[in-house]
Each structure stands twice: as structure tokens, then as C-alpha cells.
Image (tube, coloured by chain):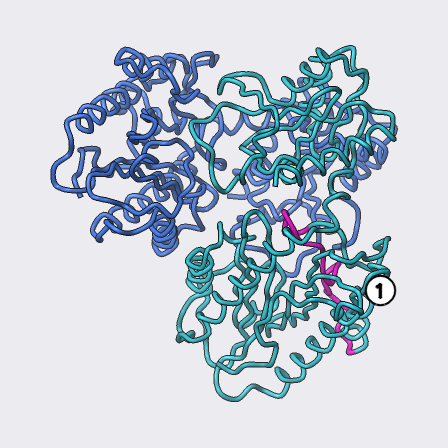
Chain colours: A cyan, B blue
């Protein structure tokens, strides 16, 4: 694994050299973790000009959830009461003779950027922009293996919940139980706050659980995901409570299912991001549900739950193989509830069998 | 309550006017919530030049955990796929004739600050700095009432856990159970990730729970807190597992208890922040535990779990009445474990009975 991180850092150094910057300062935690194996709280990574250095605060012990640091990497520990690590890193860069330092302007605040500049007055600051995020887009097989395990854990947690009695329980309790089960099965934690919506709340994207109890006749929608070694997946399903779904429920479910399938089937290397969005969106718009649709029909996943690419109408760019993404259309009818179906898949060429579905919980409409 | 928010905004406008800026853009979520009653995801608040305006994204429904918005406040909703709310707010400010706009440079990233400036080229940008954080320091009785309930919930959750069997259970499970109980008793959620450490992990500040199981003879330290209507408190205790604590355990506990009491007793209006730190720290250092001590012995709480003041050796400033704070010294012995004791209290003048203890779980050394 240290080789993996060293290779990633070397790729980033090559990009910086091509852009004419001899040193880069990475501060966004997921980017630090990608390049250093771990991201202790507040740690930043200085690449070049000579040696790569992780600058961190001294901490009594490393938190396992922060990952396993590449121990071949030089590390500088600051006192707990010492300067901001970005300031210390800028001083190191200046001392090592860097003339230009690329920083993550989309992550650093104006105040930190100013303090950093003041600490290294002779160094010209440039913008690293999304260079590390771009490296993170295509995953290696080790990263995909982590996502596969994260998906397996999520499927198990959801499967167990479905075997229990749901009527009368609150959204909050179901969400907490799902999160407990994720951890039981080996997750480092939930990948994002677990979303459980029932009745009129079902199908609301990003709905946070309330004290509403599950009732007969409800739609129940659940969206959860495990974080396994930092890699985060997403699994969403919608169920009907009781023995006989209403006609409108079956029709709405079939519609969202068709849209989600169209999105999944559109996934292939070389396909434009916005084409995946369109494949799913067209079906929902065509059925008269254009109003209130989410701005995207899915997104990349990895060390963050919502990373590039974005499947939205205006997204630029094309899919590559080995990019893990979600496909997650949904329709919500105000006051009545709705349906969402979320899967995590890996884009694969047709010769390899097409998109690899990681979240394998059934998408039949279950009446529970 | 709308009057409360309007009064807070008027105070901030007065400060801006005194500093020569006619308009301010508040983007830090806790600050938005303080001034507007709620902070829907991504919403920002424009104060002046004429009218105050909340700029937010259209969302299918408001999340109750985001608070209840002051409905007398003008609100502008952007499409989900629309511009960044800070950019839209800057355009509004320019259109309303603002010549200067104060922004939160400690919150805005360099990239957003640049986009905001480009959207309002005729407006001079200034720094609002910590003006809202300063207003937030002293709490009104309604805010303190929320913290009191948050503390009560935390005491209940911890009390129930102590009645159950602990030996053989993992840190992760205990933490999840505590979080479930917080929600059971009416919390909007945990105020921060619950910290449970046993054996050598006990007493580690910020330790995230692992699969280590509780064993006979362990120290077990727990730090939790409820979020109630946005207000967050902190409660930490350390216990011994088994019937007969070792001599070193009793001695270490008594020492940390003495330091924590000294810190609590130092709390009074007019006392320097660093004096509170010193009161607790001196006792630990005097007993030979100077190495590895936390940089602060406590901090303010409110809409964020870690806000001003800081009780650290170099902190400037003096305490005011009605400032809620934690006092939380601890000692960790590598490989053996340690002790932490955290309380949330409100600074009150002696005439009112001195500091008001919100977290009332016993601080006797319990053997469980």
C-alpha cells in the first residue's frame, strides 16, 4: 500500500511540474487521505519541492477511522497549541526553496489562505484546483474492493431490518437501527446520515428521520450506506407497508424503477455524464413529474459520498471504466410520499459484462 | 422568537454601521441559524443595505433539525441547479446599492470569495471576521433553557447505560446505544460523535470507539452530549469496571477530579479565560502529568460544540455571566488508560449562586 500512495503522489507531482509549480499543499481531508493513506484531524500534505511531508498536530493516538498512514512518508508533528498546519507547511516549502506553491483554493478559507501567504512571503501562491479530485475519479481494484465490501455490509443491514416488524416504529429508530447494523457488520460507520422516510416523507431526497411512525399503507423509503476503510457506498430502496399496495403506488414505483434501470443501462465507458442523467430523467419528465426533480440522477462515490462525476443536465465530460457511481432517481408527491431507488455501480466495458452492480438488494416492490 | 432574531440582526447591523460597512453576508451555518432561526442546507443571510434577506436553495421540505426559520424574514429561493447562494446574495447586495459588503473570511473558501467578488464587481469586500461569533458568546435565557434540556437528556442517557451490563460489550456498541438513548429522550441527535474508551483507550480525548470490549479492571470513559434545538452540551465521566479499583486508578481519578473541581470553582464573571485553564492545569502538572495534556481545559458551547471562549494557557479575554462552558481536564497514561471528567456549566455571578452545573451525573468514582 505505501507504493500505491507514493505512485499517486508522483502522479500529482508530474501534473504540478507540467503546470509550472514545484510544490503543492493538499489540505482537503479526503485528498490528504488519498495521497497519504490517512488523514489525521487537521493534517495537510506538502508535496515537494524536494521531499513530501505530512504536517499534522501531535495527537495522543491515531484514530483508526482516519486510515493507516503511509509510514514511508516524512511526517512533522506540531504541538497541539502550535500554528495552523497549513501555515507550518508553507514555511517548510519556503525553507526548502519553493518559488511557487499550489494550494486548494476550493478548500482553504480566505483567512487561512492569507495566513499561509504571510508565512511564506517569497513564495507565489497558485491554485491546485481539483487536481487531486481528478486523480481520484478512476479507482484501482483495491479501492473497488473496499466499495464492494461497503455495499455488502449495506445489503446485510437492510436485509436484516426487513425481517423485523416495521409498523409502529419511528423513522428515527429505524435509522439508528440501520446504523447499528452497519457497524455490527464491520463498517467504520455510516457513509452519510441514514435517511428513513415514511408516509408523506417517503421519497424525499436527503430527508432526515423524524418521529413519524410507520403505518399500514405507507410508502417507506430508506437510504443508507457503509463507510468501509474510508470508502462510501449508497443503497436506497422503497417499500410498501401492508399487504396490498394501492394502484398509484404500484404505478409510481414502476415508473421510478424504469427510470433507474434506464440510468443503470446507460453506464458505459465513453458515455457523457449528462446522457446518464437524461436517460433516467426523460422517463420521469415524460410521465409528468418534471417539477421538483432532484438536480442530479446520481454521482460518483469513493472517499466521499458525493464526488465527481455528477449526473446532471449540464454536466460536462464522459465516463471512464472503473468509476463507481450511484444511479438514484426518485419522485416525491407532496403530501402523499414517493419512491427513490439508489444503487452503487462500477462502470465497466461491455466486454467485462457491463456495469458492475455493488448493491444487490432486490428492487422488486416488496410489501412488508 | 422572530423578535429575538430581529434584535440580533439589528445588533449586527449596528456593528457593521460602526465599522463603515452597509451590508454583511453571513455564510457560516451556526451564524445563519443564530440570526435567522434556522439554517437550511447552504442558506446564507444578507443583512442590508436596505432589507435583510435569506438566500437559499429551493428544497422539497424543510428539515426540522435545521431549526425554525424566522418567517418575518424575506427569503429568496434559488433553483436547485442555480448559482451558489453567496454569489446570488452578492448580486442582490449590488443591486440594492451596497458599496461595501462584509463577508466571513474565516468561513468562505478562496474560490467562493472570488466568485462572489466577480458577481458584484462594484462592491468593495470587507471582512466581517468573528462579529457574529462574538454576539453568540453570551446566551439569553431561552438559549440556556435549551442547553439545560440537552444536559438533562445526556444525564438520562448515561444513567440508563450505567444500569446495564457493560463487561464484554464493545466501545462501538456502547456509543451507538448512548446515541440511540439521546434520541429516545428527545434530542435532535448527538451534539458530537460519542466517545467511548475502555482499557488503554480510556481518557483519550476525542477517541473514536473501536471494537475493544469492556473488561474487568478497565477504566471506562464516556463523553456524550445531546443536540436540543441546535444547542449542544457535553458530559464526560470515567468509571472503573469491577468491584475493586486499583490504587493507581483511585489516585489518578482523585487527581483529575481535583483539577476539574478547581476549574469549575474558578468560573465567575470577570475571571480571565486563561485563569480557568491554569486552575485545572496546575494540579495535573504539579502531579507530574504535564506531558501530553490537552491544549485546553474547556471551551464554550452553544450552537456549536466547540466555540469561544477557549480555556487555554494563551487565551485572552474574561468571562461574562450567562456564558455556557465546559470544564474537562483529563490525564491519559499511554498503554494503561486514563481519566476524563467533563461538565457543562453556565457562568453566573456569586450573588446568583455561582456557576450553574447543567450536567448533574455524579462524579464519585463508580465501580460498575
Residue A240 appears in which quarter of the rendering? bottom right
Image location (x, y in percent) of residue A174: 44, 65
Query: Is residue A288 part of the magenta span, yes or no?
Result: yes
Looking at the picture, tell me which residue is in the foreground, B30 or B205.
B205
- A136 on left or right of B273: right
* Relative to A96, residue B252 above or below: below
Secondary structure mostly taken by the magenta-highlighted segment of the chain: loop
Q: Chain of mark 1?
A: A
- B49 on left or right of A166: right
User: At 18% across and 23% down in the image, what residue appears?
Assistant: B251
Q: How packed is label 1: few (under 14 Cα within 10 Å), some, or many (20 or more)?
A: many
User: At 68% across and 14% down in the image, what residue appears?
Assistant: A91
* Relative to A112, residue A209 above or below: below
User: At 30% across and 31% down in the image, what residue appears?
Assistant: B337
Image quarter in which the C terminus of chain B is found = top left
Q: Which segment is the magenta one? A: A287-306
* Relative to B189, residue B49 above or below: above
Looking at the picture, tell me which residue is in the foreground, B78 or B264.
B264
For disc 1, the marked residue is A275
Query: Is residue A299 part of the magenta span, yes or no?
Result: yes
Image location (x, y in percent) of residue B282: 31, 12
Image location (x, y in percent) of residue B269: 36, 17
Amino acid at each position: 500500500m505505501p507504493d500505491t500512495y507514493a505512485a499517486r503522489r508522483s502522479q500529482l507531482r508530474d501534473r504540478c511540474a507540467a503546470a509550472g509549480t514545484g510544490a503543492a499543499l493538499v489540505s482537503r481531508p479526503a485528498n490528504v487521505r488519498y495521497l497519504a493513506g490517512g488523514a489525521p484531524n487537521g493534517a495537510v500534505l506538502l508535496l515537494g519541492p524536494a521531499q513530501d511531508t505530512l504536517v499534522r498536530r501531535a495527537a495522543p493516538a491515531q484514530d483508526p477511522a482516519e486510515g493507516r498512514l503511509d509510514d514511508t512518508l516524512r511526517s512533522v508533528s506540531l504541538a497541539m497549541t502550535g500554528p495552523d498546519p497549513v501555515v507550518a507547511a508553507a514555511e517548510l516549502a519556503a525553507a526548502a526553496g519553493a518559488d511557487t506553491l499550489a494550494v486548494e483554493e476550493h478548500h482553504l478559507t480566505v483567512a487561512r489562505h492569507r495566513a499561509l501567504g504571510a508565512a511564506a512571503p517569497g513564495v507565489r501562491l497558485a491554485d491546485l484546483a481539483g487536481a487531486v479530485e481528478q486523480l481520484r475519479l478512476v479507482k484501482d481494484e483495491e479501492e473497488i474492493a473496499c466499495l464492494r465490501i461497503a455495499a455488502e455490509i449495506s445489503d446485510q443491514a437492510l436485509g436484516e431490518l426487513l425481517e423485523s416488524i416495521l409498523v409502529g416504529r419511528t423513522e428515527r429508530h429505524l435509522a439508528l437501527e440501520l446504523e447499528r447494523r452497519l457497524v455490527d457488520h464491520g463498517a467504520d460507520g455510516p457513509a452519510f446520515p441514514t435517511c428513513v422516510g415514511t408516509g408523506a416523507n417517503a421519497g424525499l431526497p436527503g430527508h432526515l428521520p423524524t418521529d413519524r411512525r410507520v403505518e399500514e399503507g405507507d410508502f417507506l423509503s430508506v437510504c443508507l450506506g457503509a463507510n468501509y476503510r474510508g470508502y462510501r457506498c449508497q443503497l436506497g430502496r422503497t417499500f410498501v407497508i401492508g399487504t396490498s399496495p394501492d394502484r398509484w403506488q404500484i404505478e409510481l414505483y414502476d415508473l421510478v424503477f424504469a427510470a433507474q434501470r434506464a440510468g443503470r443501462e446507460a453506464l458505459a465507458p465513453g458515455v457523457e455524464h449528462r446522457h446518464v442523467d437524461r436517460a433516467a430523467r426523460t422517463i420521469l419528465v415524460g410521465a409528468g413529474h418534471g417539477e421538483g426533480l432532484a438536480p442530479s440522477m446520481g454521482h460518483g462515490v469513493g472517499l466521499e459520498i458525493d464526488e465527481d462525476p455528477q449526473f446532471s443536465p449540464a454536466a460536462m465530460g464522459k465516463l471512464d471504466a472503473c468509476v463507481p457511481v450511484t444511479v438514484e432517481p426518485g419522485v416525491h408527491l407532496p403530501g402523499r410520499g414517493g419512491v427513490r431507488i439508489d444503487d452503487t455501480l462500477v462502470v465497466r466495458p461491455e466486454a467485462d459484462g457491463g456495469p458492475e452492480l455493488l448493491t444487490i438488494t432486490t428492487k422488486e416492490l416488496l410489501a412488508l
